[in-house]
Image (tube, helix red, strand yellow):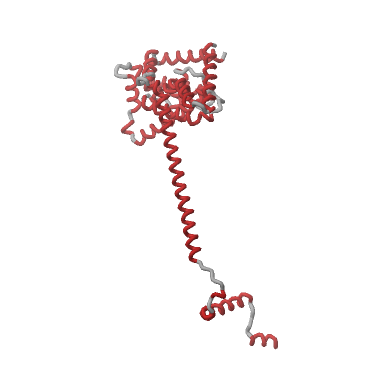
Amino acid sequence: MSEQNNISSIDQEKNEVQALFNQESIDQFEKQVNTVPENYFEQFSENILTKIQEKNKNSLLIRFGKLSVAAAILFLVIGSYFVVTQYNMNDVTTIAIHEIPTAELDAYVSNNEWMTDAEMQTEINNVGLNLDIENSSKDSIN
Amino acid sequence: MRKRLSNLVYMQSDQIIIKAFQAGSQKEQHFTELVKRHQQKLYYQIKRMVIEHADADDIAQIVWMKVWEKLDGFKMESEFSTWLFRIGYNETINFIQKRNKLAIVHPMESSEAPFQEASTLNGPKSSQIQIKLDQAILQLPEKQRFVFMLRYFEEMPYEKIALITETSLGGAKANYHQALKKMQEIIQAD
């Protein structure tokens, strides 16, 4: 029923259009639209498949290229990490304290004595101790 | 009744081909089958919109490549031809809009494009009424033109046109009648 309605409505609409333009000019328009190069439709599906294959090949190459770049970056990062850690391990030598000569230890202590004093003073200040003997005795008198 | 039955058979065999494609064996063969069944209607509809063969060919190729990419995910909730024409509609509108933007950027190159198209369409011996028809068609907004072509030349029901152009049923009918009215105005203005 709806199919029949559609057909009758299309016929009516076509009559309206044909009243506006003549049938010949409409046919001419459609004839021009339907004109295609020779064997166009026969070769169309083949052309499409060729394009699809080319596109797939290209996207595979692009994907492979991206993977290669990612692998190269990863290799560089891991490689440089190993090189740096190896270098640091070679550089650091562990020595036991009893292996250091006494003269060397004495020299170190005397060279850094002022630093020890300064650190001590900072600690005293932090704790808030008042080691001024004169003041403490006055306080005790009062 | 017979036409409706043959449409139904056609639709079902589309589904069989698509299922075979989605199953994964001989994809190219099934795809070729689909192309051969629908290529002409799609191409003609695109050509009615863009006029030039080279443009219509480019758009048709883009449409079919998209079909290849997306066919595995096609759920058959609509007819294949509706889905195909919807892709065709979107690609054609994109193409025309890009061309129009180019015409704004380079007005000297394309200011007379519709009239040149109309004259190439008709050839040297074209009658006055043919030129008027072409010019009237070319002056329609893209959507109205697409709807008019589907209705008049493909004799498509409005329900299907509405699905293709992603509008309501009333919207599709309105587009057709506005197109007709505008063509009347263009003819009467001359």
Q: Is residue B148 visible?
A: no
B136 or B187: nearer the eye? B136
Q: Is residue A129 above or below residue B45?
A: below
Please determine whether, in this image, residue B35 is positioned above or below residue A68: above
How many numbered badges does the structure rendering display? 0
* Residue extending farthest top: B2
Residue depicted at 46% across the width and 47% down the height: A71
Residue drawn at 45 percent across, 41 percent down: A64
Q: Position of residue A65 (x, y in %)?
A: 43, 43
Quadrant location of the C terminus of chain B?
Answer: top left
Q: Quadrant of residue A32?
A: top left
Looking at the picture, tell me which residue is in the foreground, B169 or A96.
Answer: A96
Name the outermost residue toward the left: B124
Classify residue A5 by image quadrant: top right
Which residue is at 64% across, 81% downward? A130
Q: Nearer the viewer, residue B44 or A66?
A: A66
Residue B132 appears left or right of B64: left
Residue A7 is situated, as x and y percent measured from the top left of the image, at: 51, 13
Q: Position of residue B148 (x, y in %)?
A: 45, 21
| Quadrant of the rendering where the N terminus of chain B is positioned | top right
Whether residue B109 can be seen here: yes
Q: Quadrant of residue B53?
A: top left
